[in-house]
Structures are given as structure tokens and as C-alpha cells.
């Protein structure tokens, strides 16, 4: 489990000064002045979100045939029902590595191209395994940073990992595009029914001992969401210690361990955090000039 970073020069900090968008402060009875907080340890400074290798994403041709590890997709043997793709970024289960899990029914191969793409991000895949259950074939990778051998703690790099895996799903399994938010821009077939953010968004906060709380978020997925959530949480001085970010089809399901000054969040602060997140997650349809 990752620990919260100290205020050393190696810590990754989010501040209001670095945020490109201000957050409204009318989110509850209790509001806090913005303070610098930390999100675990990193070895170098953040890069801009625009550099999350989105430049590598290219629209897929509608008649493309993709093959990974010698297996052709879209064949007559495939089921008519497209399974829901699942990509999990797990920071909790292994104290020494970031665990990435990918599921797409029983259609995935060994994902060698995906592992090579992760290496291009400056990462090492130190362990890989596959298991089967009723939901399909699960490919799991344990990942560390190549330059330090430590697990990934940088939110922007974690998001880059997620987008890289999804990009490879779109490339080698183009039928997955109808089940992924990124399929609208980069897939063969965009989602037929986009998710209503207001309906899909659910937020819950509960105590997880005396030293931290557990924050659950479910909402419509979109590129950059992991980084944006960490920034909005840090805007009210709440520290994100560790967690898990799941992409399940068009939905993002997030579990963060959070604290305020090394303590669990009190009820008024829980309400402030929930209100801030609800406002932020609905911002794409909000005209800021109207305020």
C-alpha cells in the first residue's frame, strides 16, 4: 500500500496554481482554502496531460483487420455479443508494483504488443499471469518504473498506462470500440448510446479506520479522468494515498483511500468532497461564463 508523501522535493504536488480551471467554492457549508497536498512519491516532475501519448491514437479504418499475436479478430468464430472490456489499474494489492488487469471476454491473446507499448512508457513488466473465470480470460501485469524499479505513483503516468491499454484494445480488437468511451473518437464503431453523466454518477464516502476514508466514484469514463479526479480532490486539501481505477466499458469505477491531515474525513468534509466531485463531473455541460 502506498503511503502519503512527505513535503520533500521528490513529492508530486497539485496546487490551485497548476490547475487550468478554478473550482467553484459554493460546494457546501464547509469550505477550505486551497493548500498543497501530495499524492505518494514520484521521481520526476509531472508532464502535461496533453502528453499522455494521445498523439499515438489514430482513428481506425472501418474495414480494418487487426491481429495481435497471430490471432485475427472479427472472425466468424467470434460471438455476436461483444463482451464488456475491463481495464483495472490497481495500486492496493501489491506494495511493490502497479497491477494492471485486462479482460475482454475470452478474446484476448498474450497481449505481447500491449506489454511492448507499456515498455515504451518507461516501464518494466516484472510479472504476468492469466486466469479464467466465468467473466472470461484475465491478463494481469505487475509493472514498475524502469529507472527506479518502484511502482508507479504518478497519476499522469497511471492515466497514460490506462489509455495505452485501451488504445491497444481498439487497435487489435476493433469490435471493442462500441463498448469504450474512446471508441467515439478512435474506434471503428462509436458507442450507440452514450452514458448520461448525471444518471451514471454515484459518489459514496465511508470511514476506513481512524486514519483514512474510502471514496467510491462511479461515472461516465473519458480520457484524462484519473488525473482530473486527483486534482479536484487535492483542491480541498484531501490527500489521495492509494486506490484502484477500473474502466468497465463506458463506465469508470474508482476506489480511493483518502485522508485529511492523516485522519479520516469528518462528515462535513465528506459532504464538501462529494459536492465538489459532483459539480466537477458534470462540468462538461456547464458554461463557466454563466457564473
Image (cartoon, helix red, strand yellow):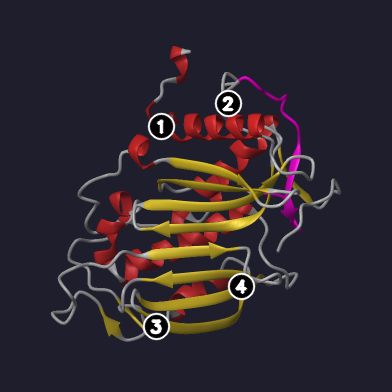
Q: Are the residues flagged by discs 4 and 1 in contact, CB closer than 8 Å?
A: no
Residue at which label 2 appears? 23
> Dot 4: what SS?
strand
Question: Residue 12 location in percent, x, y?
Answer: 73, 48
Q: In which quarter of the image is residue 32?
A: top right
Question: Residue 63 location in percent, x, y?
Answer: 17, 66
Please tell me which of labels 2 and 3 falls first in the chain: 2
Q: Nearer the viewer, mark 3 or mark 4?
A: 3
Residue at which label 3 appears? 132
Per the model, the C-alpha gap separating discs 3 and 4 is 21 Å
Please tell me which of labels 1 and 2 falls first in the chain: 2
Residue at which label 1 appears? 284
User: Residue at point 34% right, 74% down?
Assistant: 135
Q: Which mark is residue 225?
A: none
Determine the main secondary structure of the stretch shown in magenta: loop
Residue at which label 4 appears? 143
Locate residue 11 relative to residue 176 in the image: left or right: right
Residue range in magenta is: 29-46
Locate residue 116 relative to residue 153 in the image: left or right: left
Per the model, the C-alpha gap separating discs 1 and 3 is 38 Å
How dense is the environment of label 4, judged by Cα within 10 Å: few (below 14), some, or many (20 and up)? many
User: Residue at point 44% right, 83% down?
Assistant: 131
* Outermost bottom residue: 70
> Dot 2: what SS?
loop
Query: Along the line of sight, which residue is nearer the eye, 277 or 58?
Result: 277
Q: In which quarter of the image is residue 79?
A: bottom left
Please tell me which of labels 1 and 3 falls first in the chain: 3
Please tell me which of labels 4 and 1 falls first in the chain: 4
Locate residue 178 relative to residue 278 in the image: left or right: left
Question: Residue 171 location in percent, x, y?
Answer: 33, 67
Amino acid at each position: 500500500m502506498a503511503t502519503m508523501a512527505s513535503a520533500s522535493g521528490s513529492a508530486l504536488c497539485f496546487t490551485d496554481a497548476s490547475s487550468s480551471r478554478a473550482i467553484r467554492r459554493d460546494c457546501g457549508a464547509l469550505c477550505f482554502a486551497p493548500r498543497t497536498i501530495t499524492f505518494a512519491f514520484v521521481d520526476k516532475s509531472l508532464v502535461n496531460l496533453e502528453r499522455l501519448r494521445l498523439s499515438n491514437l489514430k482513428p481506425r479504418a472501418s474495414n480494418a483487420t487487426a491481429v495481435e499475436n497471430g490471432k485475427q479478430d472479427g472472425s466468424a468464430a467470434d460471438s455476436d455479443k461483444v463482451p464488456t472490456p475491463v481495464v483495472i489499474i490497481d495500486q492496493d494489492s501489491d506494495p511493490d508494483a502497479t497491477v494492471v488487469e485486462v479482460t475482454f471476454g475470452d478474446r484476448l491473446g498474450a497481449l505481447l504488443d500491449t506489454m511492448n507499448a507499456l515498455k515504451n512508457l518507461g516501464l518494466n513488466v516484472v510479472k504476468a499471469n492469466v486466469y479464467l473465470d466465468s467473466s472470461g480470460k484475465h491478463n494481469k501485469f505487475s509493472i514498475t518504473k524502469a529507472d527506479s524499479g518502484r511502482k508507479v505513483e504518478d497519476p499522469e503516468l497511471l492515466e497514460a498506462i490506462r489509455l495505452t491499454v485501451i488504445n491497444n484494445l481498439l487497435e487489435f480488437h476493433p469490435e471493442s470500440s462500441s463498448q469504450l468511451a474512446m471508441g467515439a473518437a478512435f474506434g471503428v464503431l462509436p458507442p450507440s448510446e452514450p452514458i448520461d453523466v448525471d444518471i451514471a454518477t454515484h459518489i459514496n464516502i465511508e470511514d476506513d479506520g481512524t486514519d483514512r476514508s474510502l471514496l467510491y466514484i462511479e461515472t461516465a469514463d473519458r480520457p484524462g479522468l484519473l488525473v482530473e479526479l486527483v486534482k479536484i480532490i487535492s483542491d480541498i486539501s484531501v490527500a489521495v494515498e492509494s486506490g484502484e481505477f477500473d474502466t468497465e466499458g463506458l463506465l469508470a469505477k474508482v476506489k480511493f483511500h483518502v485522508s485529511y491531515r492523516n485522519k479520516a474525513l469528518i462528515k462535513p468534509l465528506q459532504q464538501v468532497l462529494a459536492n465538489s466531485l459532483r459539480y466537477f463531473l458534470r462540468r462538461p455541460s456547464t458554461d463557466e461564463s454563466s457564473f
